[in-house]
Image: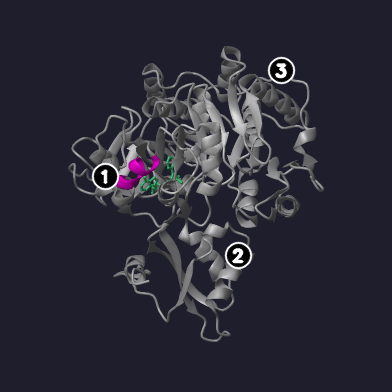
Amino acid sequence: MTTDATTPGVDAPTWPAEFAERYRAAGYWRGETFGGVLRERAAQHPDRIALIDPAPTRRTWTYRQLDERADRLAAGFAQRGIRKGDRVVVQLPNIGEFIEVVFALFRIGALPVYALPAHRDTEIAHFCAFSEAVAYVIPDRHAGFDHRALAARVRADTPTLRHVFVVGDDPGPHTALADVARDPVALTGPAPHELAFLQLSGGTTGRPKLIPRTHDDYLYSLWGSNEICGVDADTRFLVALPAAHNYPMSSPGWLGVLYAGGTVVLCPAPDPDTAFPIVARERVTMTGLVPPLALVWTESAATTDHDLTSLELVLVGGAKYSEVAARRLEPALGCRLMQVFGMAEGLVNYTRLDDDTETVVTTQGRPISPHDEIRVVDDADRDLPDGEPGNLLTRGPYTIRGYWRAPEHNARAFTADGFYRTGDIVRRTPGGHLVVEGRAKDQINRGGEKIAPEEIENIILAHPAVHDVSLVAVPDPYLGERSLAYVIPRADAAPLTAVAVKRFVRERGVAAYKVPDLVEFVAAFPQTGIGKVSKKHQRSAAEQH
Ligand code: OOB
């Protein structure tokens, strides 16, 4: 057997053999690959529509066309030297090429690293350098930003990066993706137990971690989600959130819908003005939203002229959805609500279609799999009785056993027997549903977008007029949370303004959602008993905002 970067256990811990055998014996790991699944669906129903990209001019792909396109792009990538195990950072918005590119990479066994469209120099340079990426795929421009210039900067600093592929009319100094496709060639491809891609973690540390997912484990999370959500060949799923995020990818997401032979409808932006006409025109049956979007969809539905009657199910997750808001969704949108509480590391919980309304509006669901092991523990890892809030630990057939190339972090983020420390505080109801009560990890959840305070604190600390900084969450009626930077200025430096701090972060090149929403200058930080900054005190002080 050959060993390369796709082999589990090489760059990150993997499931011990006895667990892998158990998951195979239970029928969860079916021995399929993403490339193989698309090939099968194309053989089963070649002319069914797999993908619709409605903007700016409507384009469609049948299963046969998507399959052929993946083959031709894979041949072109392979001809340019992209091999099994190579990492390729993919930063594309919700456009058809995103799906084509990742299936082409799956066919080769090259690993997509999913960057979000909002990521900028700091994040992209890190993903490319840390993953030793050989290629980076971008749009020419998106949302007013020139990705070609960013790519040129990152390429100059990243010796491994040999190719930049550009979707759009003008590739600049890079290669047009449109010129890559070739006549198909025979490719060995990956085995089902091997890595399929690297997903991003929301993160709590200075740098986002990479999450290694295998074909076997991720495909199980897809068909497991499909069974729970009732996804089948008639499902028309709207990808409203960024397609690169784990939630719209797999809960049940565009990958789940393609697995089931349904139709994926891409949405360029998730606001009602953009999404509602597409829902109406394409007869969308299902979508997944974060709570702030669910709020605006619920409000806008009351006055819209667009016909939303095709909607059967809306999933809401990524951040805590308030009970009050949850109660309003079904009557407003005329469809079923399902809450989803998941994480890119694995574990996904759903309320069920046959749950009563109280359960759907007051809980965040229960795990996909009977083999998802759930522990709710105190700070000394002692199990707590049902009903008591505690730290959620989990282990199972689609939850990773370790991050990619992060042994020190893994020692903290996982127990010795392989449970992932989610950092979430939950309570379990007598019916086995989980209720998210809070968070122990140092993270800000800004309407589903995760911010690792340390990452932004490190940037602000580099400002010459800053002595110290602490980033905390402030409650927000719309987003759930926003970020507040408490800054201690240097006594000997010129006076600093909030605007200057925000501009400094923005100019370092990070995703806009990570720029502090609020900045407050203070003389000192509250301390814990052992002299560390007390974020708990800062958070409760911040609640006054
Ligand atoms: C999803 O994935 P990530 O990796 O961006 O974030 C995971 C974290 C969880 O650990 C939890 O802190 C929070 O997001 N979260 C929720 C939640 N869903 C996620 N907190 C409260 N209520 C919820 N319903 O966000 C994600 C991945 C797959 C499916 C859905 C969401």
Query: How far apart in space, not on screen, are marks 1 and 2 (Cα)?
Result: 38 Å
Image location of residue 82, percent across then percent down? 71, 32
Task: Decide which of tag 1 and tag 2 comes sooner along the chain.
Answer: 1
Quarter containing the N terminus: top right
Quarter containing the C terminus: bottom left
Query: How far apart in space, not on screen, are marks 3 and 2 (Cα)?
Result: 46 Å
- Residue toward you, 69 or 130: 69
Q: Which residue is mark 3?
A: 186
Crowd tier of the residue under label 1, counting other residues whose Cα lies within 10 Å: few below 14, some 14–19, many 20 or above:
many
Q: Which residue is mark 2?
A: 506
Considering the whole magenta stretch, tell me its main secondary structure. helix
Please give the name of the residue rendered at 75% of the width and 36% of the height, measured from the top-left corner: 177
Query: How far apart in space, not on screen, are marks 3 and 1 (Cα)?
Result: 52 Å
Please give the name of the residue rendered at 38% of the width and 23% of the height, measured from the top-left corner: 18
Image location of residue 240, percent across then percent down? 52, 42
- In the drawing, what numbered circle is on residue 362? 1
Q: Amino acid at mark 1?
A: Thr
**Magenta region:** 327-333
Q: Secondary structure at mark 2?
A: helix
Please give the name of the residue rendered at 35% of the width and 74% of the height, measured from the top-left corner: 526
Query: Ligand 1, what quadrant?
Result: top left
Image location of residue 105, percent across then percent down? 65, 30
Image location of residue 297, percent across then percent down? 44, 47
- Residue toward you, 186 or 137: 137
Task: Decide which of tag 3 and tag 1 comes sooner along the chain.
Answer: 3
Quadrant position of residue 10: top right
Position of 505 with respect to 334 (left or right) is right
Whether residue 107 is situated above or below residue 278 in the rendered picture: above
Task: Decide which of tag 3 and tag 2 comes sooner along the chain.
Answer: 3
Q: Secondary structure at mark 3?
A: loop
